[in-house]
Image (cartoon, rainbow, N blue to C red):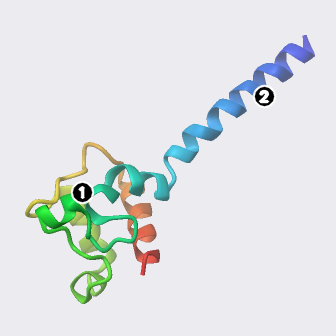
Amino acid sequence: MKLMIGLTALAVMALAIPVRGQDSPESLYKAKCQACHGPDGKGETAAGKKLGAKDFHSPEVTKMSDAELFDITKKGKEKMPAYDKKLTDDQIKELIKYVRTLK
């Protein structure tokens, strides 16, 4: 019986690890942002150029507060879609922290 409980616990832990990894800020960025903003945040992808994606390194973006970036990500702006129904507030906050590291 103890072996069965131990194996069950091990299986649950093994299954939980990939799920957490998918929600990491880097994984969320790759899934939700990279197509337009690119892996480096410069917006130099085909979709980014077409839609006018902002370069996260530009003075215009770097001077924005985290609260401003949060609102834009949550509510959308111009061609940037809203993510209020796709991401939690905490996920958006973690994405902003991640984007700030792309400098």
Q: Name the residue under label 2.
A: 10
Measuring 41% from the left and 54% from the top, which residue is drawn there?
30
Amino acid type, callout 2:
Leu
Measuring 26% from the left and 70% from the top, which residue is drawn there?
44
Above or below 56: residue 22? above
Binning the other alpha carbons within 10 Å of mark 1 as few (below 14), some (14 to 19) or many (20 upward) gives many
Amino acid type, callout 1:
Lys
| Image quarter in which the C terminus is found | bottom left
Q: Are marks 1 and 2 in contact (CB under 8 Å)?
A: no
Across and down, in percent, residue 73 comes to 25, 61
Across and down, in percent, residue 55 comes to 26, 76
Measuring 25% from the left and 49% from the top, which residue is drawn there?
84
Q: Which image quadrant for residue 102? A: bottom left
Label 1 – label 2 distance at C-alpha: 37 Å
Q: Mark 1 points at which residue?
A: 74
In front: 6, or 22?
22
User: Is disc 1 placed on a helix, strand or loop?
Assistant: helix
